[in-house]
């Protein structure tokens, strides 16, 4: 079996553009509507949306690689990087590094991609990685760069990247391709097509010793942002995390062929679902602001703490609903106090109750917006 980079014609990918046409149109249309909605937010709401969207991507792009970060620390780091007031919370190196990369991506999305940008991103990502030899430069190891799983005596190789000696040449060609296919380039490509190919192309080279997944997803975000000429704040990594098994299967299949229509179809589904997730977050933010404004000055500190904790879960809500036991854990309230507090939140129409006695669960009174998967059939129709 040969890998895609070993095959004739690499890296001249081929695909069926007709299958992606409706998805491309939907992405651009939704991007315009999203931009219009954001423009109607107040400065404080826009700031909150930016911080929440960037921190969600920072946390989820790390979680895809099995690294769990502290949300509050990530948000504090992002605020600090943006020059906004923060709580001076101490952040671990991994949290600081990924926050720096997200802010850099947000600020420089319109600039051409350079190898120095990639090296800078790798230095940021490497703050959370240990035991690396090559930091801020391409890998130099003479051993094969493989993605494997299974027992040590019988490993399964899912992918093998080009030898390290070939990486500088491959990456010079990749960077040239990325800039050439931008909206201002000599051979522009549609948004989803370019972002999907960019991710697969980069991951196929796997140029760094570690951190390739995080940087590859940032490259896709940069491509999408350039296509709509503004930071997208698209929940791409958050959606990939939900579909993580599908993500790795799709990459594994795509690494064996330079005909990439199946991969691009899958990537387009994820990007559109991510866009829907971001739109749901904006509507939830508007509802949240209205709810809190209406409750201002009417809640005790425990009720406020419990409600804010529920709101943190975003438009898909507190999984399984909030129980009295959850409330006691969050606020430190006694059983009797929790009962009174929750009844008060229901009376103020902040929460609604489902079930009785020990089966009672509490949901936010504002409408939740679970995001459904997007599917593209063989004819390019969306569902």
Image (cartoon, rainbow, N blue to C red):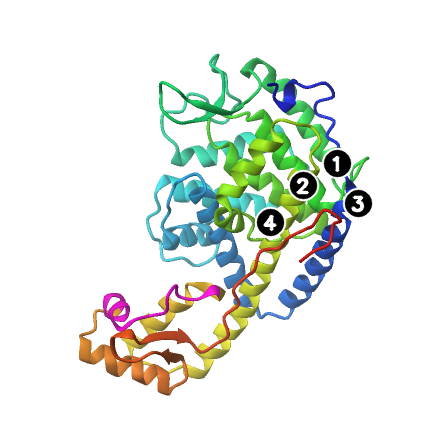
**Label 3, on which residue?**
18
Q: Nearer the viewer, mark 4 or mark 3?
A: 3
Dots 3, 2 in contact, CB < 8 A: no
The residue beneath circle 2 is 264
In the image, 64 versus 258, the foreground residue is 258
Residue 332's place in the image compared with 193, above or below, is: below
Q: Check disc 1 and report the residue beneath it.
A: 15
Which x, y percent locates residue 95?
Answer: 40, 44
- Sooner in the amino-acid sequence: mark 4 or mark 3: 3
State the image coordinates of residue 244 (x, y, percent, origin top left). 49, 44
Q: Residue at x 70, y 38 (%)?
A: 261
Q: Say whether marks 4 and 1 touch (CB < 8 Å).
A: no
Q: CA distance from mark 4 to mark 3?
A: 18 Å
Q: Are marks 1 and 2 in contact (CB under 8 Å)?
A: yes
Q: Earlier in the sequence, mark 4 or mark 1?
A: 1
Q: Is residue 109 visible?
A: no
Give the CA separation, mark 4 to mark 1: 18 Å
């Amino acid at each position: 079996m040969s890998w895609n980079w070993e095959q004739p014609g690499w890296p001249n990918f081929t695909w069926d553009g007709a299958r992606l046409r409706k998805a491309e149109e939907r992405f651009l249309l939704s991007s315009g509507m999203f931009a219009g909605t954001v423009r109607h937010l107040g400065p404080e709401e826009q700031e909150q949306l930016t911080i929440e969207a960037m921190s969600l991507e920072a946390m989820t792009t790390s979680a895809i690689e099995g690294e769990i970060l502290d949300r509050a620390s990530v948000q504090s780091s992002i605020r600090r990087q943006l020059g906004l007031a923060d709580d001076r919370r101490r952040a671990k190196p991994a949290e600081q590094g990924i926050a720096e990369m997200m802010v850099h991506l947000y600020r420089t999305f319109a600039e051409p991609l350079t190898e120095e940008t990639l090296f800078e991103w790798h230095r940021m990502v490497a703050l959370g990685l240990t035991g690396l030899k090559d930091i801020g430069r391409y890998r130099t190891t003479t051993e094969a760069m493989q993605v494997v799983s299974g027992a040590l005596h019988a490993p399964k190789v899912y992918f093998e990247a080009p030898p390290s000696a070939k990486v500088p040449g491959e990456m010079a060609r990749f960077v040239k391709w990325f800039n050439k296919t931008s909206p201002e380039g000599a051979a522009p490509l549609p948004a989803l097509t370019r972002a999907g190919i960019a991710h697969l192309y980069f991951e196929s080279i796997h140029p760094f010793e570690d951190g390739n997944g995080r940087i590859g997803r940032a490259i896709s975000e940069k491509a999408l942002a350039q296509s709509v000429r503004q930071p997208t704040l698209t929940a791409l990594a958050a959606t990939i995390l939900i579909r993580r098994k599908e993500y790795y299967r799709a990459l594994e299949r795509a690494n064996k062929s330079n005909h990439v229509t199946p991969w691009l179809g899958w990537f387009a589904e994820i990007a559109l679902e991510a866009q829907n997730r971001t739109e749901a977050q904006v509507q939830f933010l508007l509802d949240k602001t209205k709810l809190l404004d209406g409750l201002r000055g009417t809640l005790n500190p425990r009720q406020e703490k419990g409600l804010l904790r529920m709101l943190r879960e975003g438009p898909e809500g507190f999984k399984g609903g909030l129980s009295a036991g959850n409330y006691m854990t969050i606020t430190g309230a006694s059983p009797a106090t929790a009962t009174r507090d929750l009844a008060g939140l229901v009376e103020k129409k902040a929460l609604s109750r489902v079930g009785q006695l020990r089966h009672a669960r509490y949901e936010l009174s504002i409408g939740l917006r679970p995001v459904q998967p997007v599917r593209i059939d063989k004819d390019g129709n969306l569902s």
